Amino acid sequence: MKGRYLVKSNEPPFMSNVFADKSALILDWLLMFGIEKEEFSLREAAKKSGTSLGLTQKVFEALVLQGILHATGVRTSKKFTLKQPDLLLTKWLEYYRIQDRCKMKTYRSAIQGKEELLKSLEKAGQIHKVVLALHSAAEAHGLKNTNLNTLELYVQNQDDLPKIEETLQLEPQERGYEVLLIKPYYKHILKLLPEDQLKVCPALLNFLDLYHFPLRGQEQAEFIAQRHPELKRIYNKGKY
């Protein structure tokens, strides 16, 4: 599953940098926390998102030009308000398609069932090396609406891939899959997850991953967005 997504010709070229891996930490903070604030400073957003002032400033400048953020004041006293969170989500969906941005490998397994596969990883001490993704993450969030019983996992460190393949007794499968292993594009968002347990893709990234995913993805993404308390604040079905 490889491909290339071309930004629309009327999109300012710097906007693609806004949706890059590390910049996404700022977008995530805006949509999950900044949305609740009447106003916030550049320094607050940088500190809370764990990014540099320089990067945060570049992202904010781009979002102000797009009308997504509103700025008041001057220089260091400038304050910002998230005016159009649904527009930010729309543009993020235009840029990001998991099948274009992430390398994915499809497999069949001699181990039957998702629960047994996860038990095998736990027994081998590898459960902390993966993150539940796509439909598997939706189920973990309690928001599954399909009958799919596949296992989709982000593998954060690609050096762990051979051992995980061995533990799960995986064989490549060209059409369809029982297990899908994914190299993440948004590595920094996943790094925020706790290390000592089975990790689950955060709801916002889970929505973004599913929306363009070819296997019942949009259906599942919309189901999550309409029910998850943080996502339904920003989701506007008519805009996507």
Image: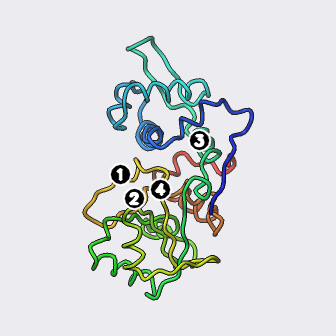
Judging by the rendered image, the residue that carries numbered circle 1 is: 191
Residue 171 shown left or right of residue 4 in the figure? left
The earlier-in-sequence mark between 1 and 3 is 3
Q: Label for residue 156?
A: 2
Q: Looking at the image, which is closer to me, 220 or 233? A: 220
Mark earlier in primary sequence (4, 1) = 4
Q: Earlier in the sequence, mark 2 or mark 4?
A: 2
Q: CA distance from mark 2 to mark 1?
A: 8 Å
Q: Residue at the spot x=58%, y=65% of the render?
A: 220
Image quarter of residue 112: bottom left
Question: Which amino acid type corresponds to the residue marked 4 in the rendered image?
Answer: Pro
Contact between marks 2 and 3 (CB within 8 A): the answer is no
Tag 1: residue type? Lys
Between the C-alphas of marks 4 and 1, the distance is 11 Å
* Three-letter residue code for mark 2: Gln
Badge 2 vs badge 1, beta-carbon distance below 8 Å: yes
Where is residue 30? Give x, y as percent: 45, 38
Quickly name the residue at label 3: 86
Sort mark 3 into few (<14), some (14-19) or many (20+) by Cα contacts within 10 Å.
some
Foreground residue, 214 or 81?
A: 214
For disc 2, the neighbor class at 10 Å (few under 14, some 14 to 19, many from 20) is many
Q: Residue at x 47, y 42 (%)?
A: 24
Report the amino acid beneath label 3. Asp
Instruction: Specify the label residue 25 is tagged with.
Output: none
Are there few (<14), some (14-19), or many (20+) residues within 10 Å of tag 4?
many
Answer with mark 2 or mark 3, whichever residue precedes in sequence: 3
> Mark 4 highlights which residue?
184
| Residue plotted at (51% across, 41% down) | 20
Q: Of circles 2 and 1, which is in front? A: 2
Left or right of residue 32: residue 90: right
